[in-house]
Amino acid sequence: MTDGPDFSTLRLPGSGDGGDHEGRSSPERLRKGLDFLVEAHRLTGIHRLNRLLDGTRGESSAEHSWHLALMAMVLGEALAPDVDLARVAAMLTLHDLVEIEAGDVPIYLDDERAAAREREAVAAERLYGRLPGDQGGQLRGLWQEFEDAATPEARFARAVDRFQPVLMHWAAGGQVWRERGVSTAEERRVTGSIRTFWPELWPLTEALIEDARRRGMLSDPGVPSD
């Protein structure tokens, strides 16, 4: 990882002008915020198994996070009317920042995903630790809430995170499924947590998988639907 810019050279609002040097508009707080934002932009360089719809490359984790937040806002109206969608969108925006250090592990690699959890926890401490303590703690808390999946907002966020790749694999004509030889049974297995986290989202998931089965996108189109 290359060194980032030197924010100490900036003369920010409040520097040497008698402004608020301790509060939320202090120069040091702003410097830490800018430093975090520049570091967070590195997520655009982390690429995932999902393909863009034109098939030219994998989507970045930053693109994935944006799409998740949008997806939660659009689907939440019908499927999660009682949850705080702003909180859901915040979790979905933040949850993959740890991939800047830990990388993205495809959903089909169970052992590697389990091993990545410790790396992600370390990355969360470092990344959110770049912010002022109270702000970093708040964002780190949202990341942990997503991981724990103990609140309705976190469970809906986790379900959306698992659903998005299904939609994109299907929309791209099953390119990823075909390349990996993914079966209907395997896809149902790796997406089964959607049913646990947010049952209301499972019928949409099953509709996509069943359509992919019928159209030969998955490796065993002859397997009947559940």
Image (tube, helix red, strand yellow):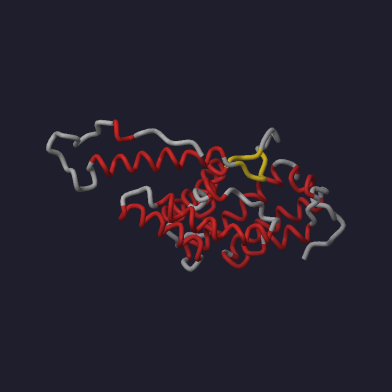
Residue at 55% of width from left, 44% of height from top? 67
Farthest-out residue, left: 18
Q: Quadrant of the C terminus?
A: bottom right
Q: Along the line of sight, which residue is nearer the eye, 163 or 49?
A: 49
Q: Is residue 129 left or right of residue 114?
A: left
Q: Along the line of sight, which residue is nearer the eye, 209 or 143?
A: 143
Q: Is residue 160 left or right of residue 84?
A: right
Residue at 71% of width from left, 63% of height from top? 189
Q: Position of residue 219 (x, y in %)?
A: 83, 52
Q: Along the line of sight, which residue is nearer the eye, 214 or 55?
A: 55
Q: Is residue 172 above or below residue 10?
A: below
Q: Position of residue 179 (x, y in %)?
A: 79, 45
How many numbered discs, if any?
0
Q: Position of residue 91 (x, y in %)?
A: 46, 54
Residue at 61% of width from left, 56% of height from top? 162
Residue at 58% of width from left, 42% of height from top? 46
Q: Which of the 4 image quarters holds residue 140?
A: bottom left
Q: Which of the 4 image quarters holds residue 184?
A: bottom right
Q: Is residue 197 left or right of residue 110?
A: left
Q: Is residue 199 above or below residue 69?
A: below
Q: Position of residue 142 (x, y in %)?
A: 42, 58
